[in-house]
Amino acid sequence: MASRLVAIVVFLACFAISSAIQGVNITAMLNGYPDYKQFNKYLSETKVCDEINAREAITLLVLGDGPMSTLVLDADQSLAGIKNALRLHAILDYFDPKKIRNLPDADTLTDTLYQAGGDAAGKMGNVKISLLDTGKIAFSSANPGGKYEATVVKTIKQMPYKLAIMEISAPIEFDGLFDTPSANNLTRILEKAGCKRFASLIATTGDVMKTYESAMEKGLTVFAPNDDAFDAKGAPDLGKMSKGDLATLLKFHALPSYNPKPSLKTVPHARALRTLASTASGKYNVTVDSQGDSVTINTGVDKSRVAATVIDDTPVCVLTVDSLLMPVELFGDAPAAAPSPDDAAPSPSPSSVADASPPAPPPADAPSKPADHKEVKASSAVVSRVSVLAAFAAAACFVVLI
Ligand SMILES: *[C@@H]1O[C@H](CO)[C@@H](O)[C@H](O)[C@H]1NC(C)=O
Ligand SMILES: *[C@@H]1O[C@H](CO)[C@@H](O)[C@H](O)[C@H]1NC(C)=O
Ligand SMILES: *[C@@H]1O[C@H](CO)[C@@H](O)[C@H](O)[C@H]1NC(C)=O
């Protein structure tokens, strides 16, 4: 009896350890603090919460509802602008007041989520920490003209070396923080991203553009195949499709929800996502596979790697994919490559097409966006460290339980 009790206690302790190293749910945590309701609401709407949850160490500077409404007004209520600001308020390291008071320098430069990938890459976006003469801890943008106007009101949470949450008195801002590329002309955005053929198909096929546009207000994630994807081996022959099927295929390339890449990474493997083509009975869904920094959309017939973020303008985001997404409802029976008469080689089966596709070249977003590179490295380091720790914890629990 007693030994069973011990076993249960040990088991629960182990469970606590392993769930802690798997990360926190910042939304659930802040739900316990009604003072930061607005801040938490925007963390969810912009999906910055997913990025925070995936990090190894974060110092989050939260705002009460008053300063938060200042920030929202400064951003002209643009969700994309608010997203930039929230990412600036997430420092990519652990700082509690004690650590800050012992910092050797008067101004300590820190990296923020704002710099990690996305459109901000290459721009400035560091935050400085200082101890004022008054004894208060203050934060400022490191950009020219930044002032120490945001001071710590109180510490909300300290989980050493992993998560610190502090309330600050005012938002940290700088000129240009709220500037965001706008997703108002989808055609132009797709054309500029090397997806001309996809853009033109959307614009000219049935009610597809209308369906996309009406989703833009509430949430839209576009998986845009690049121009080469249409000529790739195994790509369907669009000319042989009926107008109706073509429209369905195009609608299949977007979700009626806002799922930027960091959020797609958090979608459980077993959860199906609705596309713009999804029917009430759940046809034309997709699933997501992710591994480290790589995210793949799985249709059941083929898999397509999410390559780059073209635009992230909450609640609209456009991502490029390496190949066309082929719904099982349209291509499930037929061999993936609609065999053309002059195609002598046996057409590969759908799964071998997916498997044979070259392994994802390391960070896809990297070439034009140096900061993404950093994020990729950092996050894969997190993954491996976390999994080693988790394996260790699991092994320890197992041994103890025996
Ligand atoms: C985090 O918590 C919120 C609120 O409890 C919940 O809605 C959300 O699904 C949770 N997220 C994850 C990734 O578990
Ligand atoms: C959107 O961009 C396309 C391509 O640049 C252009 O032809 C079209 O006129 C634009 N539409 C609007 C409404 O501005
Ligand atoms: C399709 O996705 C929706 C939304 O996630 C879900 O409710 C439905 O069960 C899914 N259908 C199938 C067949 O997976």
Image (tube, rainbow, N blue to C red):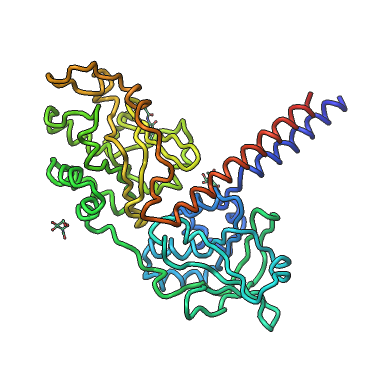
Q: How many marks?
A: 0
- Residue 319: % across, % down: 33, 47
For the residue pair 219 and 221, the one nearer the viewer reads as 221
Asked if 313 appears above or below 75 in the picture, the reply is above
Q: Position of residue 287 (x, y in %)?
A: 40, 33
Of the 4 image quadrants, the one containing the N terminus is top right
Judge from the rendering whether residue 340 lies leftward or rightward of residue 3; answer left or right: left
Q: Is residue 378 above or below residue 16?
A: below
Query: Which residue does the image show at 43% across and 69% down from the upper left?
Result: 72
Q: Is residue 24 left or right of residue 119?
A: right
Quarter that holds the C terminus: top right
Quadrant location of ligand 3? top left
Of residues 285 and 142, the one drawn nearer to the viewer in this rendering: 142
The residue lying furthest to the bottom in this view is 133
Q: Nearer the viewer, residue 214 or 53?
A: 53
Residue in the picture at 46% in, 37% down: 290
From the top left corner, tell me how far across and down residue 389 is, in percent: 67, 39
Image quarter of residue 383: top right
Residue 189 image position (x, y, % from top left) = 24, 54
**Residue depicted at x 41% and y 35%:** 288
- Front residue of 2 and 390: 390
Above/below status of 379 relative to 89: above
